[in-house]
Amino acid sequence: MIRSMTTRSHRHPFLVRAGAALGISALFTLALAAEAPRALPSGQLPHDVRLEPPKDLDGYFPFQPPASREQWNARAQQVRRQLLVALGLWPMPTKAPLHPVIHGRIERPDYSVEKVCFESFPGFFVTGNLYRPKNQNGKVPGVLCPHGHWENGRFTDAGAEATRREIVNGAERFENGGRSPLQSRCVELARMGCVVFHYDMIGYADSQQISYDIAHRFAKQRPGMNTTENWGLFSPQAEAHLQSIMGLQAFNSICALDFLLSLPEIDADRIGVTGASGGGTQTFVLGGIDPRPSVIFPAVMVSTAMQGGCTCENASYLRIDTGNVEIAALFAPKPLGMTAANDWTKEMPAKGFPELQQHYKMMGAPGNVFLKPLVHFGHNYNYVSRAAMYSWFNKHFKLGLKEPIVEEDYPRLTAAEMTVWDEQHPKPESGPDFERKLLRAWAEDSAKKLAQAEESPSQFRELAGAALDVLIGRTAAHAGETEWALSDKKDRGDYLEMSGLIRNQTHHEELPAVFVFPKSWNGRTILWLDSAGKQSLYGADGQLKPEIQKLIKSGATVASVDLLFQGEFLSDPAQPVKNRRVKNPREAAAFTFGYNYPLFAQRVQDILTAIHFAKTYERKSEVIDLVGLNGAGPLVAAARAQAGDLVDRAAIDTGGFRFGNVLDLADASFLPGGAKYGDLPGMLALNAPGKLWLAGETGRGAELVKRFYSLANASDKLVLSDNPDHSAAAADWLLAQ
């Protein structure tokens, strides 16, 4: 039971300060404002870091090691969840039976090569070659080899002329090895006694169900794939369900690990992963999200500089407030080896690696992190780099081989010899219709898991609530340290009106705000949010709207803020408000939202800042209520879900909004992942058991919210309104409380 505050009488700290500053005579001078009071002079914008150019993949991504294991364990859990949500693997998709097919064995004196295909999603195949050592007794290590962006991938052939130049400059030893550095590492690892699975990235070699141009060179939105049903990759709908090429490839890697571990000769305690460039990205991401690898060696990729230039290396939310060095650090204390070259990794010896060394020392394993800087070579996985990897696996697999391990020549396989598909093993379905079918199956699988979680409020919160933490990026309890900067104050007779800036010192953000205080405050603050910002408190005559006056007369303080790109954030109010994009001209959302929160999330963060401020500034608000009307309902629904017990009541008009219906990445309401966890009704469900007045919801949305309130034994705290005057009805409901 929330006790009534209407009989309380407080002198609000703002009002006390104003009296001292204005003097008694000024306090009782009546003045009327023509518009919402400004926090800043006309033409001046807030000093807010979010008005600077958005961060992109070429930014700076330092890693600050935590001081203790306890701090790191909490941070690692947060980053790992962020990865899984960003990759569309929260919840983890249902694993289809692999149905592996192994065929076409090619014999060599000390190893063999076979052709492999199996299913990750039903009908979606992972393809590659399996290298097995001969004359081995007992269990042997297994190594996954994702290949990276070599031309034709697993089938790459650098050609004789280019390889001879590499031999001359010391990068390679043999022509065969240099023409296919990908085969070379698989052969040598097999000779060392490891089973190696060398598998295709999507769009390379035998993996053509989604083309190379779509997976790796996507540049422009496809209108035919941008639909609310049966959408394609990179569309707003795919992003709203967190479906990406990087997520598909990460899931393929997880299933490749399942396949490797299904082989009877594999020692599950000795599993390695190594790849370079884009294959390095797959290596350390797999090491961060899957506990089964025991040793990894991502070559020429981990750095504080460029984070991955391909669409296949980016996903919305993936690197917001983190980066590749910290993602690689998730593998600690297990052995992590790396190389650097004359590319974006060249500064790793000074920026990134020292922090990893400090981190591994704190984790009690200082010898388990290694960097071989080979900056006299360009971007590569050449013989010299591979030799460093062989030594790393020899040491940590305890193979006992004599050092140095010297790579020897071998008969290179042609593409025709390696390909999986033939008359007996025909190519599977591919093309746009298959792409749509794959994403539909992925979405349906996620929806099924969500429906199961909906049977229990605690399970739903564990799944959808944890995801929302990633999508929004903050909670009210951890919104940041706030302060007030007063701009103006006026006595209006029955109430005091003050304008100024709520400054979030932690995140370097500023919110223009207005607070209207009754002369006798009951400890209750109502945050009134609207698409018009703080102007929404005022009518066309410049006076407070009647419903706002009624709330103030009840003893409540009413406050409003200009959220990002509302009100005083706008230098040109006539300009349409859209999500900003990074300079990258390719129309893939992940290039922007993999590094920056979308506007929707930033506005929710603003509401959380305002809640935190109201709850913590001097004499704290004992009761905080939220109102979200006229387009702000979805924002308030998300904010209330993230605020928990800090908010007592919420009045929300959703207008029937759904994230899954947004058809433009630039739309201010676009939210990657917004549709995946029950869309807006899912966020409303997370409001339970808090008191909620709800308008704009009918059908399944209303039923879902009602069911959650029933499961939480809080049906009496939910009011579904059909009153068309939402503003007055919401105010009356708040007054009745």
Image (tube, grey):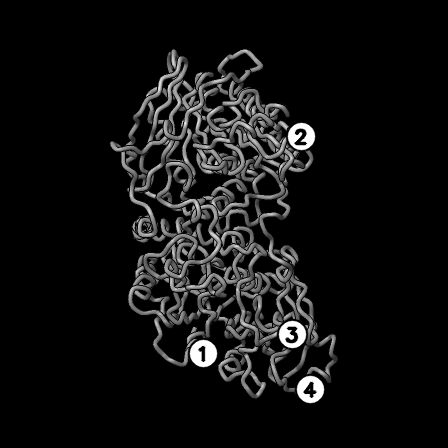
Q: Which residue is mark 3?
A: 499
Mark 1 residue element: helix
Q: Residues within 10 Å of mark 1 (few under 14, many from 20)?
A: many
Dividing the image into 4 quarters, which one contains the N terminus? bottom left
Which residue does the image show at 40% across and 17% down from the upper left? 111
Q: Residues within 10 Å of mark 2 (few under 14, many from 20)?
A: few
Dividing the image into 4 quarters, which one contains the C terminus? bottom left
Q: CA distance from mark 4 to mark 2?
A: 76 Å
Between circles 1 and 2, the one closer to the viewer is: 2
Between circles 4 and 1, the one closer to the viewer is: 1
Q: Which residue is mark 1?
A: 727
Three-letter amino acid code at disc 1?
Answer: Ser
Query: Mark 3 touching mark 4, by CB under 8 A?
Result: no
User: Residue 45 location in percent, x, y?
Assistant: 67, 69
**From the viewer's perspective, is 40 left or right of 530?**
right
Three-letter amino acid code at disc 3?
Answer: Ser
Comparing 647 with 79, the one in front is 79
Answer with mark 2 or mark 3, whichever residue precedes in sequence.
2
